[in-house]
Image (cartoon, rainbow, N blue to C red):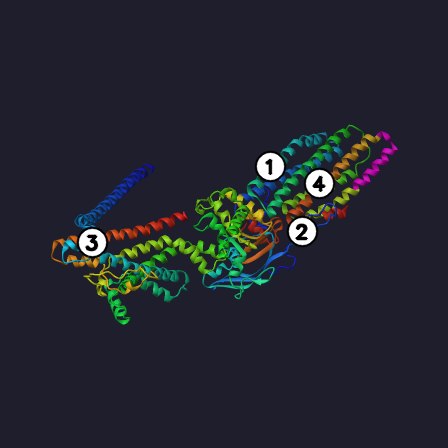
């Protein structure tokens, strides 16, 4: 039973059902987030440990995540129609719609990683996995932290996770170059390298989606958009 | 448990029905009795008096001979006195009611005035007659004239018109005043353009009641010296030479129908009693005609506002 | 709470080519400065300061008894009708800068320039024509041609002309509630006021009539300055460009409606508009 964030942080609505609906929406996102986190972890395990069962699990959960995302969307729209929320409630519901989308995309990337991992398991391993697990670890932490920040309505935590995306991007760039050198050395490894590049790219995209969620958390709490910061980063 | 409740409801309904029937029945009986009494009186009057009403009756002067007696000076006197009464009581009454309701600031002074006005309506009319005798007839030297008669009757019915005006104005919802002021109307515009027209039906009802009371008053008029036997008419208001309007009739002695009736009923001859009845019928007709006019005016102004 | 010179500043979204947001200053029709009000000994408005933007709808929201209707009625000195009321502070009406509530100002001055529509439709017990012409007759207009013209113009502006043009001399009471309210709006418009005060104009109407009136307010806001008191927050959000949130006789927050309803500055404002009040 997840604790509702409204208690203690924000006053309750006069109409209690409204509070319950918002809490339920938050819980749904939490559950979906937990599932997606797990998918990412399993996908990386499928790659690094050549775990066929892990890959199969991740791929099998794809439909489930789609259903969860649809359920979140429907619930959010229903709240918009029946409660006409304003201010913080509106921001929360509107961002729930966007966050569910980010989660679903993250799940898709995890599934893609699992599929490629399964393919790679049939090939000899090219080199010890160093960078990719490192990227994955950061991404997993980012996803976990932004989801925690979402539940706690803690924009500082979200922003701390947001900044780690730099690291992920740098790791990706260096891995990309490294794999290029492998390809140039031995063109027979091209297929494998490309798969690895795509996997790394997927992880980098997962990092981006985590930063999206972080920005949404900031918006829910503070009500202003932080596109400027994004531009500064670029 | 539920069964007991159902029975109770039926009993209650039956009881309520019986009670309603009882009250309706009682009301009907009372209504019937009152109507019967009223109808009897009127019928008796009309049956006794109507046969005597003819052109001669209406145009003759009173006479010691019943066959030649008429009510000309009486109904002319009543008409002229009512004219003066209306001319005095209506504007003064409406203005006073208007002032007290819309202009006067709420204070203990206005409260005292309000109480006294309602009390005045209950003062016996003969007191008014004494007042008029002392002040108008003797102090102001106005004489025993139609003017004084009109003045005393106006005093008598003034409270009725004032109260009716105030009630009519009070019944206008505050929203009308607020709307008028919000549009930029000043006090007088609000009163003249919106309040008085809306209060008109109520005011007219008050005027009807007032005049109907005045037309039948006898005691104050006798007190101020109305004649009981009169062989002449007051001078005509309309003259044959410019300015075609004369006010001499105001200073003329006079009589009125109720006094004429009183005079005839105090005679021993039965024929005069019948003549009195006839005069009564004429008085009734005059009252009804006056009421009818006022009701018609009220109806017309109401239709304009629907 | 004093509001600075940029209280009426709005930020328009960044243009595609310049990429920067513009801040525009809306001109003022009136300025409320430290307005206070007492019913007898009881103070109900406490030093309110607020700008009134010209050519816009400003909504006044707040819980029951917060003073928004009292505030509205200060503008046309309606409180003068009842004994024992007292004003404090100033309401400056542009462009001359007259203080509406000064005892030196005749109450008729603001009333002749400001129109009001009440919560419950209150047409006069007269014909439709006479209701709309009322304001003009009060101002001494007698010419039939001028009256006819203004009556038609006002009824058209109030979106009522088509429905009543064939029965202008029928009693106003033959109209439905929504039509009567539109008639009251036409009546307020006929004398060409500079400022319109609407006191909960749709609270007595059904949803369809309410929608008509909201559409009407929207159209009117192009040429009139309008102040609307409403206890319906969604309505305030729909029709107004600026919103003031009242509580216990004070303005807690004032700003562009878009900001007040998506990112209110005060937590009390947020609590009220999201239904966390009380």
Residue C181 in view here: yes
Tags 4 and 2 on a common chain: no
Instruction: Report how far apart the C-alphas of labels 4 and 2 lie in the structure.
Output: 29 Å
Tags 1 and 4 on a common chain: yes
Instruction: Report how far apart the C-alphas of labels 1 and 4 lie in the structure.
Output: 21 Å
Give the x, y percent position of residue B104.
40, 64
Is A173 inside the magenta-drawn segment?
Answer: yes
Chain of the residue displaying label 3 = B
Q: Which mark is residue A209?
A: 4
Q: Which residue is mark 1?
A: A74
Q: Is residue C190 left or right of residue A26?
A: left
Tags 1 and 3 on a common chain: no
Q: Which residue is mark 3?
A: B279
Chain of the residue displaying label 4 = A
Give the x, y percent position of residue B296.
33, 49
Instruction: Report how far apart the C-alphas of labels 3 and 2 lie in the structure.
Output: 90 Å
Is A189 inside the magenta-drawn segment?
Answer: no
């Amino acid at each position: 039973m997840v604790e509702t964030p409204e208690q203690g942080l924000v006053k309750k609505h006069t109409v209690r059902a409204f509070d319950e609906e918002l809490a339920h929406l938050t819980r749904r996102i939490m559950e979906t987030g937990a599932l997606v986190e797990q998918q990412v972890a399993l996908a990386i395990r499928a790659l690094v440990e050549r775990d066929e069962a892990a890959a199969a699990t991740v791929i099998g959960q794809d439909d489930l995540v789609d259903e969860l995302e649809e359920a979140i969307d429907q619930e959010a729209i229903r709240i918009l129609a029946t409660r006409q929320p304003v201010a913080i409630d509106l921001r929360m519901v509107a961002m729930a719609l966007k966050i569910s989308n980010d989660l679903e995309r993250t799940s898709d990337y995890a599934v893609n990683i699992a599929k490629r991992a399964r393919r790679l398991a049939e090939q000899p391993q090219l080199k010890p996995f160093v960078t990719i697990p490192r990227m994955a670890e950061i991404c997993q932490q980012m996803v976990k932290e932004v989801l925690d920040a979402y539940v706690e309505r803690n924009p500082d935590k979200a922003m701390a996770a947001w900044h780690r995306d730099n690291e992920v991007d740098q790791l990706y760039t260096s891995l990309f170059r490294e794999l290029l050198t492998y390809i140039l050395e031995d063109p027979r490894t091209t297929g494998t390298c490309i798969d690895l590049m795509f996997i790394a790219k997927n992880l980098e995209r997962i990092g981006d989606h985590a930063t999206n969620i972080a920005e949404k958390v900031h918006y829910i709490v503070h009500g202003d958009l932080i596109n400027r910061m994004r531009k500064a980063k670029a | 448990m539920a069964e007991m409740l159902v029975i109770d409801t039926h009993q209650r309904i039956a009881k309520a029905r019986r009670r309603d029937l009882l009250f309706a029945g009682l009301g009907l009986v009372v209504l019937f009795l009152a109507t019967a009494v009223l109808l009897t009186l009127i019928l008796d009057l009309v049956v006794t008096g109507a046969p005597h009403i003819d052109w001669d009756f209406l145009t003759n002067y009173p006479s010691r001979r019943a066959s030649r007696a008429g009510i000309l000076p009486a109904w002319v006197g009543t008409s002229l006195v009512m004219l003066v009464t209306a001319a005095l009581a209506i504007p003064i009454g409406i203005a006073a009611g208007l002032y007290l309701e819309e202009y006067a600031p709420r204070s203990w002074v206005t409260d005292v005035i309000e109480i006294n006005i309602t009390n005045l309506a209950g003062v016996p009319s003969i007191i008014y007659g004494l007042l008029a005798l002392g002040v108008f007839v003797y102090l102001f030297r106005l004489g025993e004239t139609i003017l004084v008669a009109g003045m005393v009757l106006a005093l008598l019915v003034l409270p009725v018109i004032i109260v009716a005006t105030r009630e009519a104005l009070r019944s206008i919802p505050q929203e009308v005043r607020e709307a008028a002021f919000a549009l930029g109307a000043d006090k007088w515009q609000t009163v003249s353009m919106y309040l008085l027209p809306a209060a008109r039906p109520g005011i007219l009802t008050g005027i009807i009641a007032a005049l109907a009371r005045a037309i039948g008053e006898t005691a104050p008029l006798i007190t101020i010296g109305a004649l009981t036997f009169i062989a002449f008419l007051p001078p005509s208001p309309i003259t044959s030479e410019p300015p075609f309007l004369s006010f001499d009739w105001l200073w003329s002695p006079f009589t009125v129908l109720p006094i004429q009736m009183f005079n005839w009923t105090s005679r021993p001859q039965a024929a005069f009693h019948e003549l009195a009845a006839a005069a009564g019928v004429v008085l009734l007709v005059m009252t009804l005609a006056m009421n009818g006019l006022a009701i018609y005016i009220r109806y017309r102004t109401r239709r304009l506002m629907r | 709470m004093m509001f600075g010179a940029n209280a009426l500043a709005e930020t328009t979204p960044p243009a595609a080519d310049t990429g920067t947001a513009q801040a525009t200053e809306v001109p003022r029709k009136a300025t409320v400065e430290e307005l206070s009000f007492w019913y007898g000994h009881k103070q109900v408005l406490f030093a309110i300061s607020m700008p009134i933007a010209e050519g816009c709808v400003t909504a006044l929201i707040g819980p029951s008894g917060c003073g928004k209707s009292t505030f509205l009625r200060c503008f046309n000195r309606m409180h003068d009708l009842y004994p024992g009321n007292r004003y404090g502070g100033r309401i400056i009406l542009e462009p001359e800068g007259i203080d509406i509530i000064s005892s030196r100002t005749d109450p008729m001055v603001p009333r002749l320039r400001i129109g009001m529509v009440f919560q419950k439709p209150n047409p006069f017990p007269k014909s439709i024509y006479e209701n709309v012409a009322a304001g003009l007759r009060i101002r001494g207009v007698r010419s039939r041609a001028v009256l006819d013209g203004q009556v038609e113009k006002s009824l058209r502006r109030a979106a009522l002309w088509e429905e009543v043009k064939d029965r202008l001399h029928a009693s106003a009471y033959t109209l439905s509630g929504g039509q009567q309210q539109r008639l009251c709006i036409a009546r307020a418009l006929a004398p060409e006021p500079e400022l319109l005060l609407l006191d909960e104009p749709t609270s007595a109407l059904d949803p369809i009539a309410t929608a008509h009136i909201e559409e009407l307010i929207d159209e009117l806001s192009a040429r009139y300055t309008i102040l609307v008191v409403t206890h319906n927050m969604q309505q305030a959000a729909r029709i107004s460009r600026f919103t003031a949130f009242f509580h216990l006789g004070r303005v807690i927050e004032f700003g562009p409606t878009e900001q007040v309803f998506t990112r209110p500055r005060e937590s009390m404002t947020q609590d009220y508009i999201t239904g966390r009040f009380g």
